[in-house]
């Protein structure tokens, strides 16, 4: 169907080119039309443009420009079939910029939104979320009323946003580093809700502390409320459905709802002191010792804290952070030696990143993207004075996350041991 429609378009263009009488030499046009008809669009366009340079006042100009625009469009469609997304978008943009009055330009208005969405989807699947967000920005900005733009907004939200602490302040930003904003002061250990609409954190009574009051607010920091009155809470984590916030308190794990009512409490838990995250079903959580006793650190999954499955044990190599992927295929965890992965059923540990292979970086926490295609981590290299945020894609390529602070704010670098990656998109 597609090929027959394209051939028909070319035939119409060729007929139009030679139906107009004139005194110009049409051999250049004939060669261009032949190349066009055989799918050699790049060279066909050159011949068409050469004709217009040779005959700038030709009465065939509108037809030749239509032929050029159509060749660009067919060339872009070929690039789409080959998954050469950026090239295809550039070709379609040429039509909009230089041949906006043609029928091909009208086709671009319909075809380009779908093209951009497919490009962004592929980039997301490959773990190149920064390029995906660029394509989605273009889609949403230039075609806001398109149904593809609405799907693009959903994909943009699935790519998500980060929360981290810096100098005892809590910040949030989109995954591409845009819309950076401070949402809480004198606070640490931020956690974003699964739907990206709320953030929980610990307000500390004095500088240097890690325990404090549990607070929750809208994702932009507004409508903040204290959920517990005692100042010994640490490490909040939202439940999978976002209705509860779990946290550690001395030797107990507790959960409160968003009104601050205690729903679950498990006391006398001495084997673990930190919850990493929940499995997709919300029935189990990964737990570990952040401050291991007797230099032994255990990575486990449990639903009751009374019985648990021990996935991995380290000695003199404490586990610092863990995240459960939403596809339920892996649990990623951090030790001073690097970033590692293991199946929720146990088995062999895979080293995703060894510190010795990346400038002996000291890594403190890790999280997995909502799409499951990337991980983000906080690390500090020996010759640097502050921590940085890095991400890794499926090919295990590592990049520092680019982000800038607003003009009235100094750029905050992470100074805590917690980073969270959840769904959502910040607009303010």
Image (cartoon, rainbow, N blue to C red):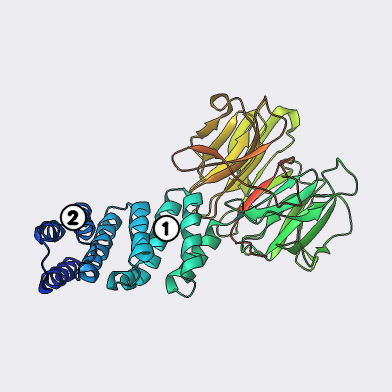
Q: Are marks 2 and 1 in contact (CB under 8 Å)?
A: no
Number of the front mark, 2 or 1: 2
Front in this rendered view, residue 4 or 109: 109
- The secondary element bearing badge 2 is classed as helix
Neighbour class for label 1 at 10 Å: few (<14), some, many (≥20)? Answer: many
Q: Earlier in the sequence, mark 2 or mark 1?
A: 2
- Using the image, determine if residue 145 lies above or below residue 285: below
Q: Which residue is mark 1?
A: 121
Q: Which mark is on residue 160?
A: none
- Using the image, determine if residue 124 lies above or below residue 73: above
Residue beneath the point at 52% across and 61% down: 156
**In the image, 212: left or right of 192?**
right
- Using the rendered image of the protein, determine whether residue 235 is visible from the camera's viewpoint: no
Could you tell me residue 53's position as x and y percent?
A: 23, 57
Residue beneath the point at 54% across and 55% down: 370
Q: CA distance from mark 2 to mark 1?
A: 36 Å
**In the image, 119: left or right of 223?**
left
């Amino acid at each position: 169907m597609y090929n027959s429609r394209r051939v028909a378009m070319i035939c119409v263009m060729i007929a139009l080119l030679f139906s107009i009488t004139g005194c110009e030499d049409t051999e250049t046009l004939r060669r261009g039309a032949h190349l066009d008809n055989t799918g050699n669009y790049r060279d066909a366009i050159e011949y068409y443009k050469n004709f217009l340079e040779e005959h700038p006042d030709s009465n065939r100009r509108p037809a030749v420009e239509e032929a050029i625009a159509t060749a660009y469009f067919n060339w872009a469609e070929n690039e789409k079939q080959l998954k050469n997304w950026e090239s295809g978008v550039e070709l379609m943009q040429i039509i909009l910029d230089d041949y906006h009055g043609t029928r091909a330009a009208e086709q671009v208005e319909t075809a380009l939104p779908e093209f951009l969405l497919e490009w962004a989807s592929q980039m997301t699947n490959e773990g190149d979320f920064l390029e995906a967000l660029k394509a989605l920005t273009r889609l949403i900005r230039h075609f806001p009323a398109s149904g593809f733009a609405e799907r693009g907004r959903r994909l943009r939200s699935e790519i998500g946003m980060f929360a981290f602490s810096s100098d005892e302040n809590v910040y949030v930003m989109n995954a591409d580093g845009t819309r950076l904003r401070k949402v809480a002061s004198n606070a640490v250990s931020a956690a974003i809700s699964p739907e990206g609409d709320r953030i929980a954190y610990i307000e500390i009574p004095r500088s240097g502390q890690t325990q404090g009051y549990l607070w929750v607010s809208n994702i932009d920091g507004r409508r903040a409320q204290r959920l517990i009155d005692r100042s010994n809470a640490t490490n909040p984590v939202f439940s999978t459905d976002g209705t509860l916030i779990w946290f550690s308190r001395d030797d107990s794990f507790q959960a409160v709802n968003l009104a601050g009512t205690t729903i679950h409490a498990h006391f006398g838990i001495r084997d673990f002191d930190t919850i990493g995250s929940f499995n997709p079903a919300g029935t189990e959580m990964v737990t570990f010792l952040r401050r291991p006793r007797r230099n032994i650190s255990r990575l486990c999954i449990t639903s009751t804290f009374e019985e648990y499955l021990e996935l991995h044990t380290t000695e003199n190599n404490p586990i610092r952070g863990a995240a459960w992927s939403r596809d339920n295929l892996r649990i990623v965890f951090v030790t001073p030696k690097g970033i590692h992965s293991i199946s929720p059923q146990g088995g062999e540990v895979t080293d995703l990143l060894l510190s010795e292979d990346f400038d002996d970086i000291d890594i403190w926490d890790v999280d997995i993207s909502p799409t499951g295609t990337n991980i983000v981590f906080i690390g500090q290299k020996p010759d640097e004075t502050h921590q940085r945020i890095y991400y890794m894609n499926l090919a295990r390529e590592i990049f520092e996350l680019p982000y800038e602070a607003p003009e009235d704010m100094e750029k905050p670098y992470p100074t805590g041991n917690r980073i969270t990656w959840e769904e959502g998109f910040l607009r303010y």
